[in-house]
Image: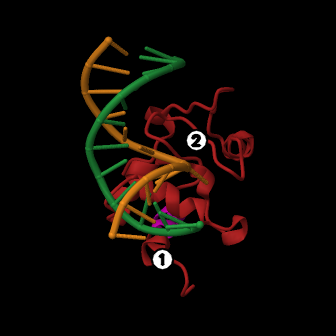
Chain colours: A red, B orange, C green
Amino acid sequence: MADIKQWYEQVYAIVKIIPRGRVATYGQIARLAGLKSPRQSGQALSALPEDAGVPWFRVINSAGRISLHRLDGGSLQRALLLNEGVEVSLSGRVDLNRFGWNL
DNA sequence: TGCCTGACGCGGT
DNA sequence: CACCGCGCCAGGC
């Protein structure tokens, strides 16, 4: 844990508290974690090991769309979300008004 | 030290 | 709804 950037842990902590069946945006995570830019959220997750026990699939961009990355073209994330009741269109779109994480 | 890249966000067309 | 451009910041080389 020592070689992991301090704020990465901060991001993971926030992602872990996202309720099951809900999704949060990168910007939202960044804000809650006190980061300077939403980009950092993605950067932290990109360095996240698959078996870290962090529900990274509940994080999407502000447009309510699943972002593509190196470990998954979007199909896996879509399947995981559908599995917990979140409606995701074929193109990877989610209705934030219904599944977004609001407090 | 400097340049390039990336799981972003937002406003405009 | 799709596409485009710009601003933003940390990391890797």
Classify residue A55 as left or right of residue C11. right
Q: Quadrant of the N terminus of chain A?
A: bottom right
Question: At 50% from the left edge and 63% from the top edge, which residue is drawn?
Answer: A17
Tell how many labels.
Answer: 2
The crowding category of the residue bearing disc 1, from other C-alpha atoms within 10 Å (few below 14, some 14 to 19, many at least 20), is few
Q: Rounded to the nearest whole Å, what is the CA distance between mark 2 and mark 1?
A: 23 Å
**Residue A7 seen anywhere in this rendered image of the structure:** yes
In this orientation, which residue lies closer to the viewer: A43 or A12? A43
Question: At 47% from the left edge and 48% from the top edge, which residue is drawn?
Answer: A24
Mark carried by residue A47: none
Question: At 46% from the left edge and 42% from the top edge, which residue is drawn?
Answer: A100
Q: Chain of mark 2?
A: A
x%, y% of residue A73? 71, 42
Disc 2 residue type (three-letter): Ser
x%, y% of residue A26? 45, 50
In this orientation, which residue lies closer to the viewer: A87 or B8? B8
Residue at mark 2 shares a chain with residue at mark 1: yes
x%, y% of residue A39? 43, 53
Q: Secondary structure at mark 1?
A: loop
Pointer 1: what residue?
A: A5
Pointer 2: what residue?
A: A67
Q: Chain of mark 1?
A: A
Disc 1 residue type (three-letter): Lys
x%, y% of residue A28? 39, 51
Q: Which residues are magenta?
A: A11-17
